[in-house]
Amino acid sequence: MNREQRRAAQRQAKKDGNGELSEKITLFGKLGDSCLVCAKPFDKKDKEMVMSWSVVVREKEEKVNLYCPECWNGALEMLQQAKEEILGYGAEE
Ligand SMILES: [Zn+2]
């Protein structure tokens, strides 16, 4: 790859990145203002909150589900437990 090609690739990467960002901002317009599980209020202007809360996009339903870190971690733990249970049963056979 020569210098000009590399520059073009970098430009393209930058453009793609911006595209993704604006897509997220569009989705943020549909974002709720509280956690779906515990109803803890969510402040879109709080950068730390935006970074730490989890957003699950349901494209089919055109819905954006919002989870606070506590509920998200709880959900992940539950998933992990369920997975281990399934894998555990599988190993017994
Ligand atoms: Zn919550």
Image: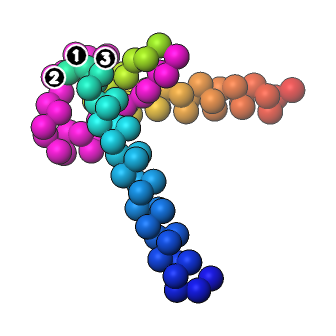
Neighbor class of circle 3 (other Cα within 10 Å; few <14, some 14-19, many 20+) is some
* Span highlighted in magenta in the image: 35-60
Give whichever of 5, 55 is nearer the camera: 5
In this rendering, position of residue 47 left or right of residue 23:
left
User: Whole-Å distance between the Cαs marked 3 and 1?
Assistant: 6 Å
Find out whether residue 51 is within the magenta segment: yes
Q: Is residue 47 above or below residue 76?
A: below
Q: Residue under label 2, please give it.
A: 41
| SS of the residue under disc 3 | loop
Nearer to me, 10 or 79? 10
Residue that protrudes farthest toward the top in the picture: 61
Outermost residue toward the right?
93
Q: Is residue 69 visible?
A: no
Label 2 packing within 10 angstroms: few (<14), some (14-19), many (20+): few
Amino acid found under the numbered disc labelled 3 = Leu
Q: Which residue is mark 1?
A: 39
Q: Are marks 2 and 1 in contact (CB under 8 Å)?
A: yes
Q: What residue is pinned by disc 3?
A: 36
Whether residue 75 sits left or right of residue 90 in the image: it is: left
Does residue 31 appear left or right of residue 12 in this picture? left
For image coordinates 30% across by 22% down, the residue present is: 30
- As for residue 37 lying within the magenta part, the answer is yes
